[in-house]
Amino acid sequence: MPELPEIEASKRVLAPRLRGDSLVSCRILSPGFCRNPSARRLEKLSGRAIRGLARRGKYLAIELEGSTPLILHLGMSGRLILDGRGPHERFEIQTTRHRLSISDPRRFGRVLFRFPKLGAEPLGPGFSPRILAELLRRRKAPVKALLMDQRLVAGLGNIYATEALFEAGVRPGKAGGRLSRAEIERLARASRRVLRRAVRLGGSTLADQAYLDPLGKPGRAGAAASLYGRAVGRCGHPLRSTRRLIAGRRAIYCPVCQR
């Protein structure tokens, strides 16, 4: 699933190209892909100028004059394509100068007019060890599951939660409410550091090539990962996976570096 760095990288590609354009049309290309907004409501956006693009967690917002934003979510396997064609296209935006589409093999993407309820923005000015401590306080769920809960922290998914926990030296299965103050401080800093680095590298393109930026360029963050997708960490130690599932999957960790 595209996470915060992939959406932020896509935003940075699209913003200078789409800003100042006007919408010509928005079309649902695959029946059933968008239940809300309706095709009729999308038609009313024709002619509205694009003021800019914004990101909230894993959501990309196209800001329009005289309207609420048009919000895109790429789901499990979606990607944005600018001025090109791709398989499994589900949604199309035509502007005065460009064509933008969502390609989504698994059809979990969404188009919305308002953000869902989202938690703290990890790259925002309000994200701090104190805020993270409040989010984790008294919670019995594994810390990795809590980091990936979009109602608590917006934008972190499996890849970057794995990396942040490694850099903080915290095991993914440890209960959130049992983290010490020092662990929380390390985790807050590591989360921001991991995400900023991934944004700088253009996000993560893995072996399946599921994510490419809107111009078709792969991200380089996956190759720089310390744990994700590896059998041996960059620390040199063999990795293990948790016995129980965390957020629906087994979590990998380093038994030496993460206590």
Image (cartoon, helix red, strand yellow):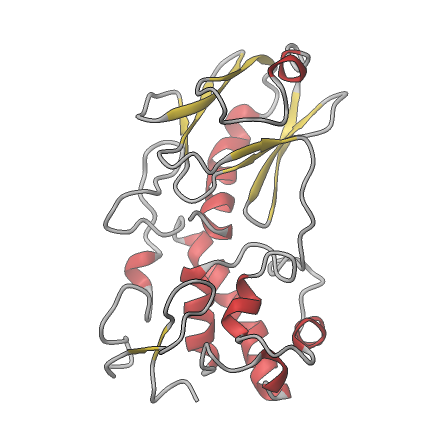
What is the x, y in percent for residue 158?
A: 43, 61
On the picture, is 185 further left or further right than 207?
right
Q: Is 58 placed above or below 183 here?
A: above
Q: Quadrant of the rendered structure where residue 61 is?
A: top right
Residue 43: x percent and y percent? 63, 11
Question: Measured from the top left, where is residue 185 in percent x and y?
Answer: 60, 80
Q: Nearer the viewer, residue 233 or 30?
A: 30
Q: Position of residue 205 (x, y in %)?
A: 32, 49
Identify the residue at horizontal 32%, vertical 38% (top origin).
217
- 206 horizontally vs 128: left or right: left
Residue under the image location 48 percent in, 58 percent down: 157
Q: Is residue 10 above or below residue 50?
A: below
Residue 225, picture quadrant: bottom left
So how many labels did they put on this image?
0
Comparing 95 with 114, the one in front is 114
- Would residue 240 be found to the left or right of residue 56 on screen? left
- Which residue is rendered at x = 67% and y = 41% of the image? 115
